[in-house]
Image (cartoon, grey):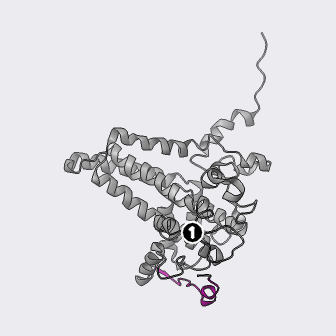
Amino acid sequence: MARRPAVAPAARWQMPAAVRRWFDTSAAADAAVEDAGAAARIDWLRAVPFIGMHLACLGVLWTGASWFAVGVAVALYALRMFAITAFYHRYFSHRTFEASRGVQFVFALIGAASVQRGPLWWAAHHRTHHRHADQAEDPHSPRVQGFWRSHMGWFLTRGAFRTDWARIPDLAKYPELRWLDRFDLAVPVALAAALYLLGSVLQARVPALGTSGPQLLVWGFFISTVVLFHATVTINSLAHRFGRRRFPTRDDSRNNLWLALLTFGEGWHNNHHFFPGTARQGFRWWEVDLTWYGLKLMALFGLVSGLKPVPAWVLAKAEG
């Protein structure tokens, strides 16, 4: 009888390691990617939870809708969008204001519930984007990679799953932020479980609301999160294609009112690329920037401080 060929230990454990990375990003570190071609390929196994989250939105066909479930979905969209725009972006990525360690962690936790990975991963990739905007090294340039790759394909590649620690030495010193980066599914899973439990309790005790565990899970978590994700990444894919350019930056960034409304001010992207060192992205009074208004309110209550304004010299260079 012919003997079966021996299986090398690395090959034998390759599949479990890939699955473990769904829950622990340090498992079988992605640094093993050997070349640019391998790094640029989509890791379909690791992308399974992301794909499953989209498919789970179809559950609405069975759960139906209620005003309560839709309201929770909208509220969680708004809260998490603010955490992404104010803290993941303007605070962690650009350090445009100051916050205590406690406030920093609370909003990092809320941002982590958005399923856009940990705050350190997010900040590292965004700093790379600014350093190489619309060049070959940009993680998500529509000029270089096209629409779908810049919108979401880049997010699922083997290379993109890694956190570039060299980009974030100022943030890597916080063990709580490193934990959120390592176990980036922990907070979303906890949120999903809490929504299911809340819906089940309300179904039993307040049936007049017309909601249930599955319905609140589908609307409050899956639909709200998927819409939130795609709204956020329109700044990568659409705000470098559609809109007006007030400043002659070296990249393709544009200002877009509709994207600004959708993303709480992030659509004033040409403003931001010209001068990313301000907590405000709507440079003119009529440029709606909900994140800026929220930060001003937080500053009023002493939760944040040192909001960096738009310098006069920046406004003087504006072309309209």
Q: Which residues are magenta?
A: 304-318
Residue 309 in magenta? yes
Name the image quarter holding the C terminus.
bottom right
Residue 5 location (% of width, % of height): 78, 22
Local secondary structure at mark 1: helix
Residue 273 location (% of width, % of height): 64, 73
Q: Nearer the viewer, residue 70 or 125?
A: 70
Q: Residue 290: which quarter of the image?
A: bottom left
Residue, far top: 1
Count of all numbered marks drawn on residues in the image: 1
59 in relation to 216, above or below: above
In the rendered view, does 211 fall on the left or right side of 282? Answer: left
The residue identified by callout 1 is 89
In the rendered view, does 8 fall on the left or right side of 304? Answer: right
Q: Residue 150: which quarter of the image?
A: bottom right
Residue 251 in magenta? no
Name the image quarter holding the N terminus.
top right
Identify the amino acid type marked 1.
His
Q: Residue at x 68, y 76 (%)?
A: 248
In the rendered view, does 211 fall on the left or right side of 276? Answer: left
In the rendered view, does 126 fall on the left or right side of 217? Answer: right
Q: Residue at x 47, y 73 (%)?
A: 291
Residue 132 location (% of width, % of height): 73, 66
Q: Is residue 139 visible?
A: no
Q: Residue 165: which quarter of the image?
A: bottom right
Residue 243 location (% of width, % of height): 58, 67
Q: Residue at x 54, y 80 (%)?
A: 283
- Tell me if mark 1 has few (under 14), some (14-19) or many (20+) residues whose alpha carbon lies within 10 angstroms of its own: many
